[in-house]
Amino acid sequence: MDNAHDIIRALIHTEKTTLYEPEGKYLFLVNNCANKIQIRRAVEEIYKVKVKNVNTLISTGKLKRVRYQLGRTRDLKKAVVTLKDGQKIEVA
C-alpha cells in the first residue's frame, strides 16, 4: 500500500462527526490492513495538514440473511484523526 488513496477510502461526514470538527477530529474509512503510521502519512499527504493523533477502531460485520442462507457484511476499519491546533480539513 504505497498509494495514499489506497489507505484512505473516504472521509465520513455525518451529523455526529460534525460535532467533533471544532475539536479538530475527523473520521475516515480506511483500509483494514493499514496501521496508524500509514494512516497519519496518508492524511498528511492528501489533505496537506499536520496530524496530532490517530485512533482506530474495527466494526465487525454483521450476519444477514440472504435468501435461504446466512451472509455477512464486511468488516470496516475507521480512524479518528486529530489535527494539530490551527489545522482544518475543508469539507464540502
Image (spheres, helix red, strand yellow):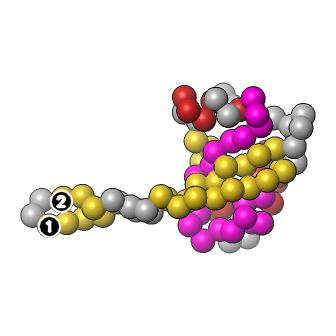
Look at 77% across and 37% down and name the residue there.
24
Mark 1: few, some, or many residues within 10 Å (few <14, many ≥20)? Answer: few
Say which quadrant the N terminus sits in. Answer: bottom right
Query: Residue 23, located in which quarter of the rendered image?
Result: top right
Question: What type is the residue that disc 2 sits on?
Answer: Val
Residue pointed to by mark 1: 69
Look at 12% across and 59% down and name the residue there.
67
Look at 64% across and 29% down and name the residue there.
19
Q: In the rendering, at what x and y percent does residue 53 appear?
A: 79, 53
Residue at disc 1, secondary structure:
strand
Task: Indicate whether 79 appears above or below 47.
Answer: below
Q: Is residue 15 magenta?
A: no
Residue pointed to by mark 2: 66
Residue at disc 2, secondary structure:
strand
Task: Indicate whether 71 appears above or below 83.
Answer: below
Look at 63% across and 49% down and name the residue there.
28
Please report the bounds of the magenta region as a residue range: 22-40
Q: Are marks 2 and 1 in contact (CB under 8 Å)?
A: yes
